[in-house]
Amino acid sequence: MKRTLSDNPVPPTLSRRDFLKTSTAAGLGAALTINAIGQQSPAVATPKKTDEFDIAVIGCGAQGRVLIESVLRIPGIRIKAICDIWEYSRTYTANYLKKYGVIVSVYEDYRDLLAREKGLDAAIVATPDWVHAEHANACLRAGLHVYCEKEMSNSLEKARSMVRAARETKKLLQIGHQRRSNPRYIHAIERLIHERKILGRVTMAYAQWNRSKADPLGWPERYTIDQATLDKYGYRSMSEFRNWRLFKKYGGGPMVDLGSHQIDLFGWVHGSNPRSVTASGGTDYYKNWEWPDNVIAVYEFDTPQGRSRALYQVQTTTQHGGFYETFMGENGSLVLSEIPQKGNWAMREPHAPEWDSLAKAGLLQAEAVPIQKTASKNVFLDVRVTAEAGRWPLPIELAKPAHQPHLENFFDAARNGTPLNCPAELAFESCVAVLTTNEAVKARRMVEFKPEEFKA
Amino acid sequence: MKTQDLLTRGLAAGALLAFLGAGLAPAQENTEKKAQLPHVWDGGKSTPVHLIELRDENDKPIIPTETNPFPYSARYTCGPCHEYAKVAAGRHFNAPISRKDGRPGQPWFLVDAATGTVIPVSYRDWPGSFSPESLGLTAWNMTMLFGRNMPGGGTAEPPAEMEAPDPSARWTVSGKAEVNCLACHNASPKQDHSEWAKEVLRENLRWAATAAAGLGEVGGMASRLPSTWDIYDGPNPDDHEWAVVPYVKYDPKDFDSKHRYRFDISYPPTSNRCLACHSVTPVGQALSDSDPDVHLAAGLKCADCHRNDLGHDMTRGYEGEAADKGRAMLESFTCRGCHLGEDAEGENRVTPGRLGAPYPKHAGIPLVHFKRLTCTVCHSGSVLKDGFTRVRTSRANRLAIYGVASWATDFPFIYEPIYAENSRGKIAPNRIVWPSYWGRISGKAIIPVKPEEVAVAAGDILKAEEHAARVLAALTTAAAEGETPVLVSGDRMFRLNVDAGLDASAYGTQKKNGWSLGMLKDGAVLPMVPDFDPDSPDRDPGLETRVQELLTALSADPAAVSTALALDGTLAAPDDPAAPAVKPDGRTPVFIMKKTLYRLSAGYLETVPAPEGKAILKGFAWARGDELGPLFSDLDIRTISQKAGREQTLTEEQVTLVLGAMGKSAVYISGGRLFRLNGKGRLTAERSEAAKPVMWPLAHDVRPAQQSLGRNGCSDCHSVNSGFFFSKLDGRGALLTKKTEKRSSTSFMGMSGLFQRLFGLTFLVRPILKIVLIFCGLVIAAMFLYAGFRALGRISGLSDRK
């Protein structure tokens, strides 16, 4: 039977405008207006409006600047002060803010910042992992809400102290696992996997973060921090300061830097913490790293539907495949990546219940047409191969910097009381899983977790 | 238009002066520290070998085998011997702080063909040009717009004080473009101006000089990196395909064992380097028909006359420059000084003949010509014989930048020679451009509107060609080998060109109504889908497969169906500039054959009855719910057809619609006229100060004496119909219209055309007058002879005897 034209065949897809009421365009426009014109030098500061929120940024390196870029797009957030022990980062960031008309107070020592900057509402901590606890706890105790970059710490004890400090001060502590606020991830994991059970029983997960080999970070010689200052802040050398992620004193290596994002997703999808981890890795390529430059880990998860396993690898000598996460179940699989081109679709098992209703409801986009056989002059070409299964793209777009929704969630929680997407307690659980993986690599055996280990 | 910017300019100038005075202190200190040779010429006339180490922006030597080396820095590589601050204050770099700069030159032209915008822009206080500040253009904007022809420094290297606030600026990612010494002084055949332009477009500013000089191979694009990236963040280990961090690879073979690079330096620069940015060529002239400037042909270089010392205060060579700069020596670098030995006042106080300059006889030319005309009137630029000549210049029309596709532009339309009185009261030849821009009336002023704002207000009105091109591009994916999708309308056929625009060609002998899409194959246009009866059980299933392929191809680009205007001509709501350029609006492509409508559903072809009352539609259309419309609106087709083969990019209908969308105060300037809507919504044209053209004097190319004006006698100019006095010029802008300013040559000179015609007439009777005068002379001579003989006779007594 023929359909009529008014039977709209196009499902009501969830565009970014529909899904994200605060579009980037509007957000950016408003943010720039407010930040560029409204923000004043501290010397001529205007009285704070009730909806304005003053923050400081402690740690202005590459990650700090990434967070600042997002903060500038959020209406009502005023960056009042920045802090970094490295003059180069301080100057760079102050100049970066200046082009948006944002004039900030600049500090070398976070203690001076906290002592002098009155009226702050929150702080963003983007310093090396080993001082997260020191900085975040000090801010919490100064009465500030804190957004702290992941990993919480390179020490479980320090990470635990952060949870406790947040509890004691009754201030918010959001940890920067930004995928927790990414609408694509929320849609895929909460809507499709948990609510609609699109995969059926999840039996396997796989994630990887492979990146090319890289040289140690350098620095302009005229901006070398003098040894006395390095000593004051606990760094043995400028080289270690610049490449802190590679050293056990300051960081956790690639497993922590990269893996923590994805191991956190394993727990989110399975709805539980792992019961064990078996890992292998080593410092096989780089001679001057203290942490393993490659790790392969297998996690076991006990879920109400049964046991599931997750395989994870991080490589720092090849970018093969890049970074993405795959969740596999009896009815299909779902591929995600923070870069949509690398993962933003579901694939249905042939026997699975139909997904057309999901497409009509706008939860998935209609299956992409499989590649069709085309006329070829090559008569010897054997085309009798199984066509690749059709991909069902997710209908959600994130037209914002990746960290912006997570920061928005933090500021929304601080101003309006909405729940944090990654509070310290939750982040501590994945911190346990991740830091223990490094221990498993060292122990060269399976390490089993006890449930109480995930409690701070 | 300039006065409003005084404060801004003052601040900017102050900032730059502060920068030059104090900000460069580290560089000066460095220079002092490293100086091995004082910059005092020792008299040697050979160019020293430049076997020197390359140094980066941190003043560190570049080791070619090191990983992730930095690009070279002129400040620290050239600076130790050639004081960077002094060079950076030179004329090629100082526009932002040296706004009073003698005789006007060619401004930059802010060109946006899509909105019909051609605005002259200059930091210099030149009449007819807008200051960048008045247009809201920051140093970053100017660098991105015109950096292709900038030699680094100045605008492309603003001090931090000038940067704030400008959210669009990305100096921290791109770095700044230091003075590019090698752009002029590198005599190596590796020096590539096109590479410079490419790197600027990629925002690889700190790498551009290294790439353009061929010192190293540069890759990556700063333009694709996040605004927070810093060069010390190093390469991105997660992305080696798209957001690739700029890098440079040096070839160790180019260096000696001490890591020194052997430059091929030319002081003064070769003319080829100057001509990269200073070429002027008549439109349509064949390369084989192009002669160089007579001075170059004689073996001189540009820099032989346009000299400078370390301060790079270029000698421009115009009369009056010596007084402007207080340097008498400059009198010998004007035409008059070099060839005649005269200073600007006409006194013989200059030693002529530099570089063997010949002394012209100028035999028989009345002296008034030398008092009233500059030398360039007769000797420079195009000959005003058959009308004014349209030319293209390097900086305005992006000449000599080569790549995959031609990057030259038709805009702006530049004409020469316009003879007009200069500030010294002499007639001089000029080039002229009529500006085209959208504006808003504010009091008595017209405030230009940025092209991007116009585009937002215009919505789909200005996208007819883009829309058609997108449709054709989408259909290309469904074309078989040898097929080219085309749009046929009237007696023309339109196809996609390599610049994603439309090329028009004649098709058929009769104008056809409406439009159709087809596939061009072997010179014939085949229908996209042959007629068939969808209800026939015997229909060829291959035809429906074809429909599916074509609809799938069209669906791949939402803009192919979403930018079309609705049938009633209503306009899309103005959008915010931050939104993506293409916004799917729910329209999907459909195909209608007889009473059946084909559309895609989840990738599969399905049919529904075509709605009643829409039977007029056939072929490809768009659908949205119950709405149905043709793929191309009537406005699209009218616009495309009217502009076919024309260089103008706007029609009167488009301007009328856009002015309506922009609101009451909106105006459009083009061709010397101001356009606005009257109370009835009709487009009117009127004269306006805001529509006046911008002119600047020309000096090159200089023609040989035998091709100079007057070579054929007085009638070259003084005749009833001489091109010199009576050529006509229509104001030409981006709008396709007959309502333009029409000027004669005499009107530019401020002279009476009637007087010049009458004066020209006198040259018709002058030959007869000469005969009469000669006859009279002979009669008088005979009388004197007679009288002489009589007197002689008396003296000798012969008369008395008689």
Image (tube, coloured by chain):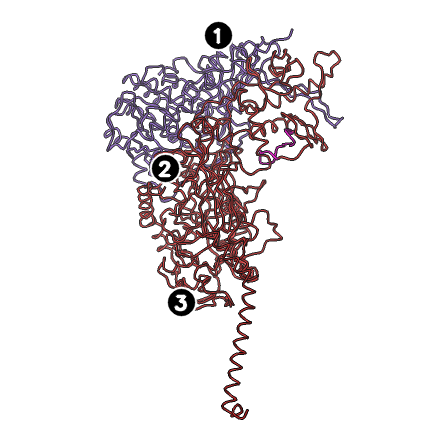
Q: Which residues are magenta?
A: B486-503
Characterize the magenta stretch by its predominant secondary structure.
strand
Q: Is residue A323 visible?
A: yes
Q: Between disc 2 and disc 3, whose residue precedes?
A: 3
Residue B497 falls inside the magenta stretch: yes
Quarter holding the N terminus of chain A is top right
Q: Residues within 10 Å of mark 3 (few under 14, many from 20)?
A: few
Q: Residues within 10 Å of mark 2 (few under 14, many from 20)?
A: few
Instruction: Indicate whether A290 appears above or below A147.
Output: below
Q: Are marks 2 and 3 on the same chain?
A: yes
- Residue type indicated by callout 2: Ala
Q: Residue A335: x and y, percent?
A: 53, 19
Q: Is residue A235 visible?
A: no
Q: Residues within 10 Å of mark 1 (few under 14, many from 20)?
A: few
Closer to us: mark 2 or mark 1?
A: 2
Q: Quadrant of residue B511?
A: top right
Chain letter of the red region: B
Instruction: Give me the chain letter of mark 3.
Output: B
Task: Give how far apart the Cα atoms at labels 3 and 1 are.
Answer: 105 Å
Residue designated by label 2:
B445
- Which labelled disc corresponds to residue A304? 1
Q: Residue A283: x and y, percent?
A: 48, 32
Residue A381 falls inside the magenta stretch: no
- Residue type indicated by callout 1: Pro
Look at the numbered disc 1 and give the secondary structure of its residue.
loop
Instruction: Indicate whether B8 appears above or below B589.
Output: below
> Seen in the image, is B636 located left or right of residue A270?
right
Residue designated by label 3:
B347
- Residue type indicated by callout 3: Glu
In the figure, what tint was chain A given?
A: purple
